[in-house]
Image (spheres, grey):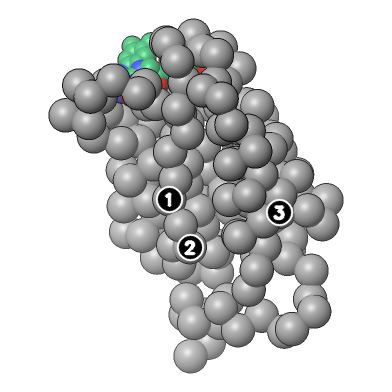
Amino acid sequence: MAGSAGDFFSLEKGKTMKALVVFDSTWGNTEKIAHAVASGIGGGARVLRVGSVDAARFDGIDLLVLGSPILGGRPSPSMHGYIDSIPEAAARRLQVATFDTRLMMRFARIFGYAAVRMADQLKEKGCALRSTEGFFVKGRSGPLADGELARATEWGSTLSMT
Ligand SMILES: Cc1cc2nc3c(=O)[nH]c(=O)nc-3n(C[C@H](O)[C@H](O)[C@H](O)COP(=O)(O)O)c2cc1C
């Protein structure tokens, strides 16, 4: 099954997973979650802002985690563009996970979730999806809801398990 999603779920036991967390953020809430996720993944997971990272370069990366605020039910245009620019050959070798930051209000559900849309976009490219998650902010500019940083670290640690 060379090049298929299955390869990545059978990473050699004990091998350290190399992870890259790419985020977009206006007010810093998604950025904080991105760092918490990376600390949960461990192993020196890198964190980069979208726009500062070349989507064509995934040398040695096993796990790509993408995070965006929800804007009208969607990821930010920059994050959408970033996913769009990942070459399909690279996508087929990547495990991915997505998260968003979102409002707690009930109306937010009507518009849908950026994490789910990003996951769909990545799956269409041929990526192997590990997980999607949402983290809550108390208002548009934040702050993060209580306990969300700890939950993000915990989610990251589940991603590091092969
Ligand atoms: C124009 C705009 C549209 C938004 N649309 C949604 C939405 O559809 N659903 C939702 O839960 N939150 C929505 N939000 C709230 C954002 O998710 C929130 O501002 C974001 O989590 C902040 O993240 P940041 O600090 O990383 O920029 C919207 C915010 C803005 C500014």
- 85 versus 90 height, above or below: above
Tell which of 133 and 82 is nearer to you: 133
> How many marks on residues?
3
Amino acid beneath label 1: Thr
Would you name the residue on which mark 1 appears?
132
Q: Is residue 29 left or right of residue 58?
A: left
Is disc 2 surrounded by few (<14), some (14 to 19) or many (20+) residues within 10 Å? Answer: some
Q: In the image, what residue occupies the spot 67% across and 62% down?
A: 160
Q: CA distance from mark 1 to mark 3?
A: 15 Å
The answer to whether one can see residue 75 in this image is yes
Q: Residues within 10 Å of mark 1 (few under 14, many from 20)?
A: many
Q: Residue 150, relative to residue 16: is it above or below?
A: above
Mark 2 highlights which residue? 130
Ligand 1 is within 8 Å of the C-beta of the residue at disc 2:
no
> In this rendering, would 40 be left or right of 102?
right
Which x, y percent locates residue 21? 64, 43
Q: Which mark is residue 8?
A: none
* Mark 2 / mark 3, whichever is N-terminal: 3
* Picture residue at 56% right of the left edge, 32% below the top: 148
| Amino acid type shown at disc 2 | Arg
What residue is rendered at 60% in x and 41% in y?
Answer: 152
Image coordinates of residue 91 in percent, x first then y, are 49, 61
Visible residue check, residue 20: no
Q: CA distance from mark 2 to mark 3?
A: 13 Å
Q: Amino acid at mark 3?
A: Ile
User: What residue sits right under mark 3 in the picture?
Assistant: 41
Question: Relative to 92, is 158 above or below?
Answer: above
Q: Is label 1 in a helix, a strand or a loop?
A: strand
Residue 125, above or below 2: above
